[in-house]
Amino acid sequence: MKSTILLAAVACTASAALLAPAAVAAPGPQLTTGPVNADLGGASAAASANRAPAVKRHTTHTTPKKTVTVKANDLTVMGVTWKGSDPSSQYRVLEHGIWGAWKDMPADDGGGPDSSSAEGSGAVEGTEPLLLSAGQQVQVRSAKPAAATKSLAVEAFETPTSGADAAAAGDPSAAADTSQGELGATAENASVVQGAAAQSATAQGAGVQNVAAKSANIPNLGRIVTRAGWGANEKLVRCKADTTDVNKALIIHHTSGATNYSRSQVPGILRGYLEFHTKGRKWCDLGYNMLVDRYGTIYEGRRGAPYSGRPVVGAHASGFNTHTFGVSVMGTFNSRQPTSAAVKSVKRIATWQAVKWGWNPGGKVKLKAAKGDTVKYKAGTVVTKSTIFGHRDTSYTDCPGTKFYAMLPSIRKSVAASAKKAGPEHAIAGAIRTYYYTHNGTVTIGMPKGREANRLRSGGARQTFAKATLSWSKATKVQPVRSGFLTAYRKLGYEKSKLGYPKGVERKVKGLARQDFQGGSMVWQKGRAVIAYNNKVKAVK
């Protein structure tokens, strides 16, 4: 028997590059378990100039005895899910009117949550996703038609791209890049995504968000494309991220997918992964903490990974998710190396993590295995690994590909040298962190210049940044002090002075800049700050 899914076409402004017929996409991004975030509102929106096009889900419930046909009229992420026995799913591609040979669907090779975790207990068995380009047609069947498989389904997520995707990914031409070779030197500059504001670390607010080149600037890492930048539908996130006390190592992956995608297609691919893993596999979120495309652009993966004061536990290496940071390069690297731009970005991520958590990029680390589906070690086993290692070192997989894996010794050496030259990492935490990321802090406030000073007057806290100082007290909450007012406030002794903590932001009153504090006000007059308290007026020199 045979059933057919015809995926409805959705208009998009960026033309899709033809992906390899056998293109296999990423080991599953996911997220650890906790209470569902009820405040993550918003629904998938229709395509417009500055919003991600809605992802359309097409599910065909089937049995191991049936064949399902999928026709993709847009960029599509497709996978198979089931309960019970593995049906050994296979697929074949229609090329020039002729069906090709049957091939095994890419197996789930060790990505995902630890099977002993709450997230793992709720997960559904499945394949890795297959990436289809517009116009491709495939058939899916089971190699074991008599398998005792239940709830077998073919999941297809149509994920069109838009001009906003091109802007987010740093592609000025939006649609033209379909080259398949190694990138030239100029492409390495694409790792810096030009654009405006960073997005809230808590990602509250809206399902499919404005994706117009939203980025964040992370100390010792540089600019990345945020989840808002690639158009993540935050309503799909099913659980809060688990956190741990420290990261001890970095695990390198590849997505086992096509390598000939265009720059502007990447945000759409990531949206498709998010849909398949949360709706199809029932994972909480993307599993990788970060992803890197072949142009060197870095993308935020699991929500909160770049910003949290505590490390966010990923779901990228079953059995070894805790105390590790998972970064995946999009593509397959068994017969070819990743681009130099991608490798440079992986090195940047590794340097950032090493400095942030204080581990030696050229050293070793001891990690304890948790229970996992394809992990090489029994739960509870303590193993010693390099602090930068490949997924194949802990799971039965070829990830991150033979060619990429061979590069790890040189990557460790390079990162060790870079880490010695990197500046200190100053964490942003608590209420100040929340204010920073909900007010586009990387752009409007700048990078932190030092650690947070806490246990101040009335139990308050203060942290200095490149463009402002953020002060917090229970009574006044977080308020910024900037520019000339900041210079005067610093001279007076900050909150120790009679002014106390700022009560609000700077504003215009009768044509003059003014900011109110607990004990008085500051007014900018004739090129200097004038303070007023206790019915007295005083200029700060």
Image: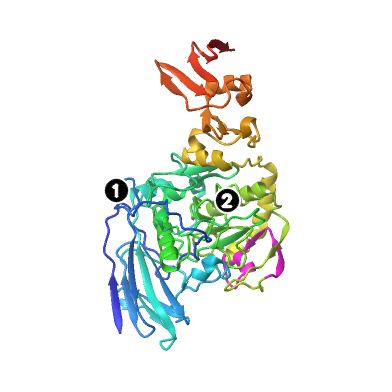
Q: Quadrant of the N terminus?
A: bottom left
Mark 1 residue crowding within 10 angstroms, few (<14) / some (14–19) / many (20+)? some
Which kind of residue does numbered mark 1 sit on?
Answer: Ser
Distance (Cα) linking label 2 and label 1: 34 Å
- Kindly identify which residue carries mark 1: 48
**On residue 344, which mark appears?**
2
At x 50%, y 41%, the residue is 437
Residue 396 seen from this side: yes
Would residue 508 be found to the left or right of residue 315 on screen? Answer: left
Q: Which residues are magenta?
A: 380-402
Q: Nearer the viewer, residue 470 or 440?
A: 470
Would residue 136 be found to the left or right of residue 273 on screen? Answer: left
Earlier residue among tags 2 and 1: 1
Q: Nearer the viewer, residue 193 or 27?
A: 27
Tell me, yes or no, whether the two marked residues, 2 and 1, touch with CB atoms within 8 Å: no
Q: Secondary structure at mark 1?
A: loop
At x 57%, y 67%, the residue is 117
In the rendered view, tell whether residue 104 sits above or below residue 77. Answer: below
Q: Quadrant of the C terminus?
A: top right
In the rendered view, tell whether residue 248 sits above or below residue 422. Answer: below
**On residue 118, which mark appears?**
none
Q: In the image, is residue 387 part of the stretch drawn in magenta?
A: yes
Would residue 148 be found to the left or right of residue 465 on screen? Answer: left
Query: In the image as oriented, which residue stretches furthest toward the bottom?
Result: 146
